[in-house]
Structure formats: structure tokens, C-alpha cells
Image: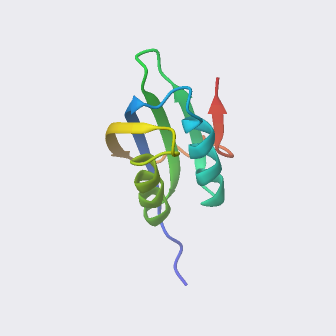
Amino acid sequence: MTEEKTKRIEIIVTGQVQGVFFRASIRDFALKLNLEGTVRNRRDGSVEIIAEGTEEKLNELIGFAKIGPPSAKVYNIDVTWKEPERKLSRFRVIY
């Protein structure tokens, strides 16, 4: 069995994504996927997600971020793939 390579994504989500449990939903979903990373609100009203894990699990997170929780309205997501820094720990919300 081969170990899958760790990858990193940085996502900016725009839309009605603050004050609608978006960060908590992302955190809960990422924890189920055993991803490491953070999610935080940005001053411009968007949400930033940084995550590391396997490409398969990161793609699942991207799919969830495109929809968000029922109260969110996602207009756009911008995903940037990067080399992992391996400095992240258990997925958490940054306040």
C-alpha cells in the first residue's frame, strides 16, 4: 500500500458566507475528512480556508465549500493548490 502525497489548498469563498455557520460547517466537514488547517472570516466579507491532506479529501472539501450550509449562498470560490507546509494541526476556526 502506498502513502498518498499530502497537498495544500488555499480557498477564498465569496457570497453570503459570514454569520451563517459557514466556518463551523467547514470545520466539522474537514474534521470528518481528517484534514489539517484553518478557516476564518476576512474583512471583505469572504471566508478563507487553508487545508492540507490528500488530493481526494481536499477535493471533497472543495465540493462542500462550493455549497456550504443551507443558510449560506456561495457565489464563487477561488482555489489555489500549493506545496504543503506541514505546519498545520487539527482543523480549527480562527476568530
Nearer to us in this view, 4 or 18: 18
| Image quarter of the N terminus | bottom right
Colouring chosen for the image of the structure: rainbow
What quarter of the picture does the C terminus occupy?
Answer: top right
In this rendering, position of residue 85 left or right of residue 73: right
Q: Relative to 88, does residue 30 appear above or below in the rendering?
A: below
**Residue at 49% from the left image edge and 70% from the top image edge:** 4
**Could you say which quadrant of the image residue 38 lies in?**
top right
From the viewer's side, name the closer residue of 5 and 12: 12
Q: Is residue 16 above or below residue 63?
A: above
The residue under the point 55% across, 29% down is 40
Q: Residue furthest bottom?
A: 1
Residue at horizontal 46 percent and vertical 30 percent from the top: 47
* Residue 25 x %, y %: 59, 44
Between residue 38 and residue 46, name the one nearer to us: 46
The x, y position of residue 15, in whole percent, is 37, 31
| Percent position of residue 7, x then y | 45, 54
Q: Is residue 5 above or below residue 22?
A: below
Kindly identify the residue that appears in the image at 33 percent across and 42 percent down.
80
Residue that sits furthest to the front in the current view: 71
Residue 87, given in percent of the width and then of the height, sits at 60, 40
- The extreme top residue here reads 43
* Quarter assignment of residue 27: top right
Task: Give the total number of marks visible in the rendering.
Answer: 0
In this view, the residue in front, 74 or 38, is 74
